[in-house]
Image (tube, rainbow, N blue to C red):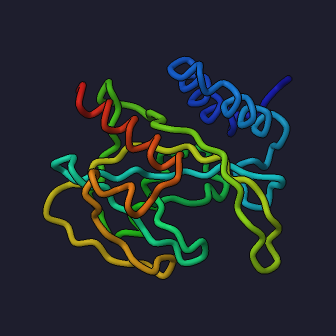
Amino acid sequence: MVVAMHREPVLSLLREYRGRHPDEGAVVARTLDLVHAHEDCLRRTCLPGHLTGSAWVVSDDRRHVLLTHHRKLGRWLQLGGHADGDPDLLRVALREAREESGLERLAPWSPTGAGAFVLDLDIHPIPAHGDEPAHDHHDLRFLLVAGPGQEIRISEESLDLRWVPLRDLPRLADEESMLRMAAKARSLLEHA
């Protein structure tokens, strides 16, 4: 099957992720199926789901994570959002993190120090809202480190925004995918 060039960056990230996390083959396979089957997988109009890019933003000292209390979903989550056609999901995660936090100095983290590195992949259901039907987000999540000395700013998409000590994360967010992402980031940063 020939895949349009604009989807190749995503396919490359997914293949690399599958190689590092063979135990997550089912979630990778579902996302690969979406990308292969839907040329518009990077657009929010793609149903039954579409690709999103998220940012697990840690503080410069690596002891806190920046979470938003999402206005629509009413839960504490990582920053992120829709690709809106952009095939560079790291760029999407950076854009969304900046828009939702007011932070300008954010650096992507990878074990090699360069290139896009998917920290986590998650598929989660989004409930129907207004005219938008229920659908899935196939979320590629990237680890970002915030530069020191910046002030955060709550956006219209959030009820609250705060730096949460990593040890306190389970008090605000007990979802398996959030705790999994925190564990992956902690393991990578401890061994860096």
Point out residue 56 in the picture as x, y percentages from the top left corner: 40, 50
Residue displayed at 75% across by 35% down? 30
- Quadrant location of residue 154? bottom left
Q: Which of 114 and 26 is in front in this view?
A: 26
Residue displayed at 68% across by 34% down? 27
Point out residue 5 in the picture as x, y percentages from the top left corner: 70, 34
Residue displayed at 52% across by 68% down? 75
Q: Nearer the viewer, residue 144 or 123?
A: 123
Q: How many marks?
A: 0
Point out residue 34 in the picture as x, y percentages from the top left corner: 78, 39
Q: In which quarter of the image is the N terminus?
A: top right
Query: Is 34 situated left or right of 177 in this image?
Result: right
Point out residue 103 in the picture as x, y percentages from the top left corner: 30, 65
Query: Is 99 situated left or right of 121 in this image?
Result: left
Q: Which of 170 and 68 is in front in this view?
A: 170
Residue displayed at 23% across by 27% down? 192
Query: Is 141 situated left or right of 39 in this image?
Result: left
